[in-house]
Amino acid sequence: MNAADWLPTWRYDPARTYAYRQIDGDTFVAVLGLPVGVRSDESLRLARYDAPERGEPGWAEATAALWSLVTGSPLALSLPPLYVGTFKERRTFTRYVAEVWIDPAGDGNLLNVSDLMIAGGHGVGVARGEERW
């Protein structure tokens, strides 16, 4: 997807939406910037992707890989914008499931984080709504 084609239908301002706390290889906490200058801190579970759970082989690697993608580095000093589309988790409605895109080259070519994690071998792809909780 190209950034010029991205329509902010979810109403999060990418320039003010960023990751600030990692949970594991498929979940992190982000500040979601709303257009009116309000912010919302939310736990985001990546859609269509399952990472190993704590204690399972590959957990630490998946957790580090996700944090590196959404912050731009393992030890983030400046946080890149995130393009986020969310929907409420269907079973509990207590957290957001999210499609998250990044622009690592800064050229407007957006890459889907779930797809990158799957391609990197850090977990498995699943149908939306079938993610492990």
Image (cartoon, rainbow, N blue to C red):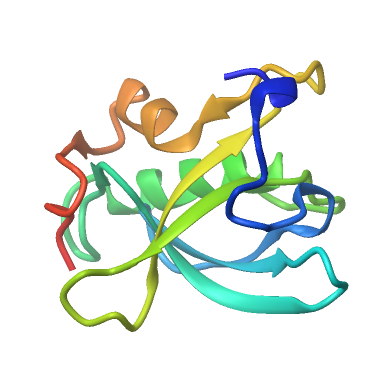
Residue 20 vertical placement versus 12 (above, below): below
The residue at 85%/71% (across/down) is 36
Which residue does the image show at 80% across and 78% down from the upper left? Answer: 38
Nearer to the camera, 66 or 18: 18
Residue visible at 49% across and 63% down in the picture: 28
Location of residue 133 by image quarter: bottom left
Which quarter of the picture shows residue 17? bottom right
Task: Give the image location of residue 55, x and y in percent.
Answer: 19, 64
The quarter of the rendered structure image containing the N terminus is top right
> 71 or 111, which lies in front?
111
**Residue 130 x, y percent position in the rendering:** 12, 52
Depth check, front residue: 121 or 103: 103
Q: Quadrant of residue 11?
A: bottom right
Residue 41's place in the image compared with 100, above or below, is: below
Q: Is residue 86 above or below residue 29?
A: above
Query: In this rendering, is residue 84 above or below 69?
Result: below
- In the foreground, 90 or 7: 7
Q: How many marks?
A: 0
Q: Residue at x 75, y 67 (%)?
A: 34
- Rendered location of residue 39, percent (x, y): 75, 76
Q: x, y (%) of residue 70?
A: 61, 46
Q: Is residue 86 left or right of residue 6?
A: left
